[in-house]
């Protein structure tokens, strides 16, 4: 199993996502997509990675004082944890997180990011989600602070599907 035995059983996608990079035979460069994302156009490797190996990603600016959901708190935990451990100066309440879409990742960098925060990540892993957890966004945040990222050119639509939507996007 790619999830360490001490964290099983789990019913928590946050826990599962923390260990994706441990999947046997996973490519060094991979793309993670949640089960609520669908591609609607052909996507290519260069949509997600630069020739020199950086990830391409869209960043959303958030203010933690206006975002009181469990998911956003986990994103904030991840942002602050990586910023602190990489000695990156950040604003107190403002942070960036990747857009909820397809997320390019680099396996060896994921392992480095995990090991950088292993003590606090492991302390908060639970079978069910909690506000104290870190989430898979530690990986692209680590990329941003340590290696740099490039802006994504993918046209994606994030919607709650509560209305008619235009499916003329790369990813919905």
Image (cartoon, rainbow, N blue to C red):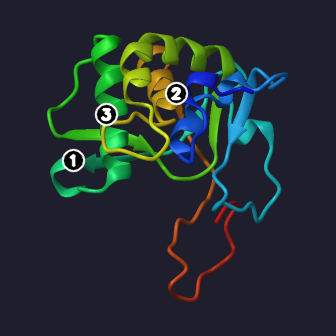
Can you tell which of label 3 and label 1 is closer to the viewer?
3
At 28% from the left edge and 11% from the top edge, which residue is drawn?
A: 87
Q: Position of residue 89 (x, y in %)?
A: 22, 19
Looking at this view, name the residue that lies furthest to the bottom.
Answer: 164
Return the residue nearer the eye: 158 or 150: 158
- CA gap between label 2 and label 1 equals 20 Å
Q: Is residue 9 above or below residue 52?
A: below
Q: Which numbered tag is attached to residue 64? A: 1
Relative placement, left or right, of 84 versus 136 is left
Say which label, 3 or 1, has the lower sequence index.
Answer: 1
Q: Report crowding for label 1: few under 14, some 14 to 19, many 20 or more residues within 10 A (C-alpha).
A: some
Residue 139: which disc? 2
Q: 160 left or right of 42?
A: left
> What is the secondary structure assignment of the residue under circle 3?
helix
Disc on the earlier residue, 3 or 2: 3
> Of tags 3 and 2, which is closer to the observer?
3
Q: Residues within 10 Å of mark 3 (few under 14, many from 20)?
A: many
Depth check, front residue: 86 or 77:
77
How busy is the neighbourhood of tag 2: few (under 14 within 10 Å), some, or many (20 plus)? many
Q: Are marks 3 and 2 in contact (CB under 8 Å)?
A: no
Query: Which residue is found at the position 24% from the left and 55% from the top?
Result: 67
The answer to whether 99 appears left or right of 17 in the picture is left
Question: In the rendered image, which residue does mark 3 sit on?
Answer: 77
Judge by depth and name the residue closer to the eye, 13 or 109.
Answer: 13
Look at the picture and state if 38 lies above or below 95: below
């Amino acid at each position: 199993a790619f999830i360490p035995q001490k964290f099983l059983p789990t019913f928590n996608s946050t826990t599962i996502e923390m260990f994706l990079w441990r999947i046997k035979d996973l490519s060094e460069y991979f793309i993670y997509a949640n089960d609520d994302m669908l591609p609607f156009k052909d996507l290519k490797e260069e949509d997600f990675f630069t020739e020199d190996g950086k990830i391409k990603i869209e960043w959303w600016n958030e203010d933690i004082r206006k975002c009181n959901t469990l998911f956003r708190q986990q994103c904030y935990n991840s942002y602050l944890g990586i910023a602190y451990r990489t000695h990156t100066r950040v604003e107190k309440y403002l942070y960036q997180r990747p857009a909820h879409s397809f997320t390019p990742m680099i396996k060896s960098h994921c392992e480095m990011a995990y090991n950088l925060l292993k003590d606090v990540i492991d302390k908060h892993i639970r079978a069910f989600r909690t506000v104290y957890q870190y989430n898979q966004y530690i990986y692209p945040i680590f990329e941003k602070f340590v290696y740099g990222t490039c802006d994504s050119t993918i046209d994606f639509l994030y919607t709650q599907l509560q209305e008619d939507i235009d499916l003329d996007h790369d990813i919905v």
